[in-house]
């Protein structure tokens, strides 16, 4: 942010910001190349994968995935673990029959992802889809689902760049930029070579992965300032120590908060320990009647955006890469004092 601020009126002596610069200039092109290199290096993306920077956010991929991957097949498998996989399922139903592999369940009053032995995978499915980290529900996979030879697709919007990933296990990975990568509107798509070029000709060019691959994500004018911001974020992630460091930091932040919640009789998180998100921690208070007061007092302490998603209620602490460890300490200190004042 500091860097973007300093460069806002004059980017490297050009007398203008990256926002005003054409994507055809050498300066912009070299930045784009470096951004791709950084991304590939951070995630150790194998050579048989293409990396795309598109518009329309993760939501655009809810349609692009079926449009590009069905390739004549009629069904796709969806693992439904929360709000975002539900939305993706709804969109896919416009294009194919969706087979629901599994859904969230409860065990001893805790939310769980049912074990793989109970899943109903369809061997004719064009792909298997899941959401690595369900941002709203605070549910995260702790392993990569084993789906055999069928291409695996993952929405990693709220988890990409928060830990190393074995890209080779996937057919497609995508992530909206606004959680860990930069500005909203941009979506990063990592797609394996053999899955490119199978979209029917009847679909809009803008929805065809091959068109974007052939045009290096510049089929339409790229969101130049968003690219610039992502390039800065990637530099920052590298400087911090890469994805290993990001993973340790996220485990530390979320671990502290869960530990506090579990030790308190006032706050509750109902996700079973092994499926808890390392990024988004939803929690409820002893009674909903406290919610409004909690939000108000928290914001007076500079603790913002704690209100849970309207679909699940309660509170949610989202702790993306940019969140310093001290912010969690402040949150916990505030939660402690709120509890003491209200029991
Ligand atoms: C935020 C989010 C989205 C939505 O992204 P848009 O940019 O609004 O399309 C999709 N999936 C997950 C997991 C998210 O966290």
Image: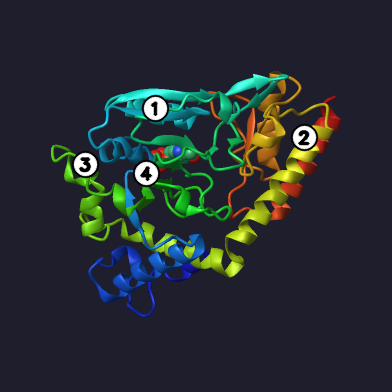
Secondary element type, mark 1: helix
The label nearer to you, 4 versus 3, is: 3
Residue at which label 3 appears: 199
Q: Residues within 10 Å of mark 4 (few under 14, many from 20)?
A: many
Secondary element type, mark 4: helix
* Between 160 and 333, the one nearer to me in the picture: 160
The label nearer to you, 2 versus 3, is: 3
Reply above or below: 221 against 132: below
Secondary element type, mark 3: loop
Find the distance from the CA under tag 2 to the CA under tag 4: 33 Å
Find the distance from the CA under tag 1 to the CA under tag 4: 16 Å
The label nearer to you, 1 versus 3, is: 3
In screen coordinates, is 103 left or right of 88? right
Find the distance from the CA under tag 2 to the CA under tag 3: 47 Å
Pointer 2 or 4: first along the chain: 4
Residue located at (53% from left, 54% from top): 161
Residue at which label 1 appears: 89
């Amino acid at each position: 942010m500091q860097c973007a601020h300093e460069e806002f009126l004059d980017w490297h002596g050009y007398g203008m910001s990256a926002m005003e610069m054409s994507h055809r200039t050498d300066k912009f092109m070299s930045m784009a190349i470096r951004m791709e290199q950084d991304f590939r290096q951070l995630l150790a993306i194998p050579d048989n994968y293409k990396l795309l920077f598109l518009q329309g956010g993760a939501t655009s991929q809810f349609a692009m995935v079926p449009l590009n991957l069905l390739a004549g097949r009629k069904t796709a498998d969806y693992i439904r673990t929360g709000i975002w996989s539900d939305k993706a399922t709804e969109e896919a139903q416009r294009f194919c029959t969706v087979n629901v592999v599994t859904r969230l369940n409860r065990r001893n009053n805790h939310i769980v992802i049912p074990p793989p032995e109970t899943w109903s995978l369809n061997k004719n499915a064009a792909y298997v889809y899941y959401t690595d980290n369900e941002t709203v529900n605070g549910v995260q996979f702790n392993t990569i689902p084993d789906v055999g030879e069928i291409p695996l697709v993952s929405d990693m919007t709220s988890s990409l760049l928060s830990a190393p990933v074995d890209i080779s296990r996937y057919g497609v990975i995508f992530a909206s930029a606004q959680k860990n990568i930069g500005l909203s509107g941009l979506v990063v798509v990592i797609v394996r070579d053999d899955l490119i070029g199978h979209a029917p000709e009847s679909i809009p060019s803008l929805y065809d992965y091959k068109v974007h691959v052939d045009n290096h994500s510049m089929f339409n004018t790229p969101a130049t300032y968003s690219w610039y911001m992502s390039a800065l974020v990637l530099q920052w992630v590298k400087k911090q120590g890469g994805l290993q460091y990001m993973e340790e930091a996220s485990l530390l932040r979320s671990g502290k908060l869960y530990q506090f919640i579990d030790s308190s009789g006032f706050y509750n998180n109902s996700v079973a320990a092994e499926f808890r998100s390392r990024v988004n921690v939803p929690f409820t208070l002893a009674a909903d009647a406290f919610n409004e007061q909690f939000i108000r007092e928290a914001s007076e302490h500079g603790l913002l955006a704690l209100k849970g998603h309207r679909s699940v209620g309660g509170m949610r602490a989202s702790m993306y890469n940019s969140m310093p460890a001290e912010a969690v300490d402040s949150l916990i200190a505030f939660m402690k004092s709120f509890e003491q004042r209200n029991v």
